[in-house]
Image (spheres, rainbow, N blue to C red):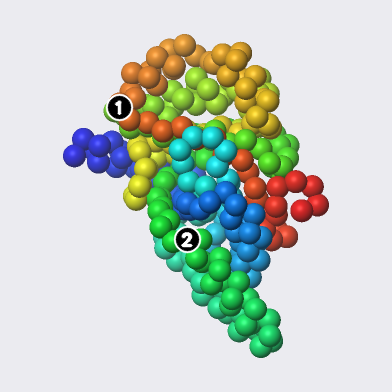
Amino acid sequence: MKKITFILAFIIALSSSAQSVVEITYLDMPATKIARFVELHKEIVNSSISEERTLKGHWVYRHWYGSGAAIVIYDVFDSAEDAIKDDALAAFQKNLAQMDEGEREEMTKKFQEWWSHFDGHWDEMRVIDFDNFYITREGVDWDKPFVAVVGQYNVKNINETARAYINWQIKPGVESGSLMGGGVSAHYKGAGLDIEVFQSYESLVDFAKHVESGDGGDADARKTFWENVQGHHVDQIYLHIGHLDNEGFNLAGADR
C-alpha cells in the first residue's frame, strides 16, 4: 500500500505538466540473431506507419553490458489513453492490403519471422514528466550509436528521489557537456522497479571519462537520492541502434 501511495502521488503531481507514457518491450535472443532482427524491424516499422497511429517516439537499443535483455524498445506516447489507442498491427495490415500479391506474401513471411523474436518477451509501462525530469543539451545529434546507461531502483519517495537524481547527475552532466541528456521515469505497470534513471553519452569513452572524473552536482541531492534507495536495483548499458523519425526507421549512423 505504501508503494502504491507514492506512485499515485507521483502521477497526480505530473498531471498538470508534460506527462508522457513510455512502453518498454524487452526481447531476449542470441547475439547472432540481433542483426537479422534489426533488418526485419526496420521493414516492419516502416510498413506500420499510419496517420491513425498515436506513437510519438520509437527507440531501439541493443544490450552491451549487464544482465538485461538483448533488445530493448521504447515507445513514447502523450498519454496512457494514446498508448491504448495505438494499433501498430492494424496499420501494418492496412498497408499490407495495398501491396500487390507478391509483395504481400513476402512481407507476411517477414512479419512472421520478425514476430518470432518476441517469444518470451516481457514489458512494462512507465510515466515521465519531460518538463521537470528530463534534460538534454541543445542541438544534440541523436543519429549515432550513442551509449545509454540505465538504472532501476525501488525507493521510498519517487518524486523526491527523481528530483534528487536530476540535481545530482543529469543537470550538472548536461551543463558540463559530458552528457547528451538524461532523465528519470516512474513505474506504472508491468515488470520493473519504482524509478528508472537514464543517461546518454556520445560514446563508451565519454561514459568512462564521466565515471572516472566522479562529476556530480549537489552533494545534498546525492545524499537524498541514496537515502531513498531501498534494496534491489539493476544497471544496464545499451547501445542505440535506431529510432523512428520523419523519414521512417532510421538506423544509427549517417546515411543509414
Q: Quadrant of residue 249?
A: bottom right
Q: Quadrant of residue 6?
A: top left
Q: Which residue is mark 2?
A: 118
Secondary element at image label 2: loop
Q: Residues within 10 Å of mark 2 (few under 14, many from 20)?
A: some
- Mark number displayed over residue 190: none
Name the spot of residue 174 as percent of width and height, x first.
62, 26
Three-letter code, disc 2:
Phe
Name the spot of residue 29 as percent of width and height, x first.
51, 53
Secondary element at image label 1: strand
The quarter of the image holding the N terminus is top left
The CA span between labels 1 and 2 is 30 Å
Q: Name the residue rendered at 52%, 47% in the picture.
A: 70
Q: Quadrant of residue 204?
A: top right
Name the spot of residue 33 as percent of width and height, x first.
58, 55
Q: Name the residue rendered at 50%, 26% in the picture.
A: 166
Three-letter code, disc 1:
Gly
Q: Name the residue rendered at 48%, 46% in the picture.
A: 69
Q: Are marks 1 and 2 in contact (CB under 8 Å)?
A: no
Q: Residue furthest left?
A: 1
Q: Is residue 180 left or right of residue 10?
A: right
In this view, 76 is above or below 240: below
Q: Name the residue rendered at 65%, 78% in the picture.
A: 106
Q: Which residue is mark 1?
A: 231
Say whether residue 78 is visible: no
Q: Is residue 227 left or right of residue 119?
A: left
